[in-house]
Image (cartoon, helix red, strand yellow):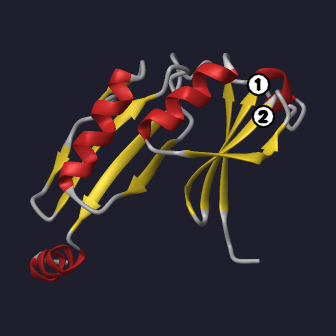
Amino acid sequence: MSKMIFVNLPVADLARSIAFYEAVGFVRDDRFCDGTAQMMTWSENIHVMLLTHEKFASFISKTIVDAQASAQAFFALSVESRAEVDAIVDRAVAAGGTADPSPVDDMGFMYGRGYEDPDGHMTGINWMDVAAMTAAMQREPA
């Protein structure tokens, strides 16, 4: 099995979260769902597990933080173009999310924006021209 990442997120309303993640481009994988959890796929190796608070709590001994008030992580996903960055953030807003919980990052060779889902979990969407970024990094003094 190849290396994969599964980001587990506690959500208040599983159906709402499924609809939100589908709207921004994730695909449902119903092999991993049971009414308390739903796997959403971004790419072959990147998945988000949406879990009801009760299901999430069964895996941990800590308190689930209120993602509307606190941040524990800020996930970043890459896309193929600047236009795709904007399109995904626009879809997130249309689906009930909030755009740009952190400053827009525009360095010419790299462009990133983000969104918060309805539960407050933050995701960054980023595009970069790797060759231009590498060249720019080599010009900067150490």
Q: Which residue is mark 2?
A: 37
Compared to residue 120, the image places residue 50 above or below, namely below
Q: Which residue is drawn at the image coordinates 67% and 17% (left, top)?
A: 12
Residue 91 percent location from the top left of the image? 34, 32
- Say the numbered circle drawn on residue 12: none
- Say the numbered circle drawn on residue 52: 1
User: Which quarter of the picture shows residue 101?
Assistant: top left
In this view of the protein, which residue sits in the foreground, 55 or 31? 31
Q: Which residue is drawn at the image coordinates 51% and 17% (left, top)?
A: 68
For the residues bearing labels 2 and 1, Cβ distance under 8 angstroms: yes
Compared to residue 95, the image places residue 29 above or below, namely below
Q: Which residue is drawn at the image coordinates 26% and 41% (left, top)?
A: 87
Residue 3 percent location from the top left of the image? 68, 73
Left/right placement of residue 93 relative to residue 28 reads left
Q: Which residue is drawn at the image coordinates 78% and 34% (left, top)?
A: 37
Asked whether residue 84 is in view, the answer is yes
Left/right placement of residue 134 relative to residue 58 reads left
From the image, which quarter does the C terminus lie in?
A: bottom left
Left/right placement of residue 52 relative to residue 113 reads right
Circle 2: element type: strand
Residue 4 percent location from the top left of the image? 66, 66
Amino acid, disc 2 = Ala
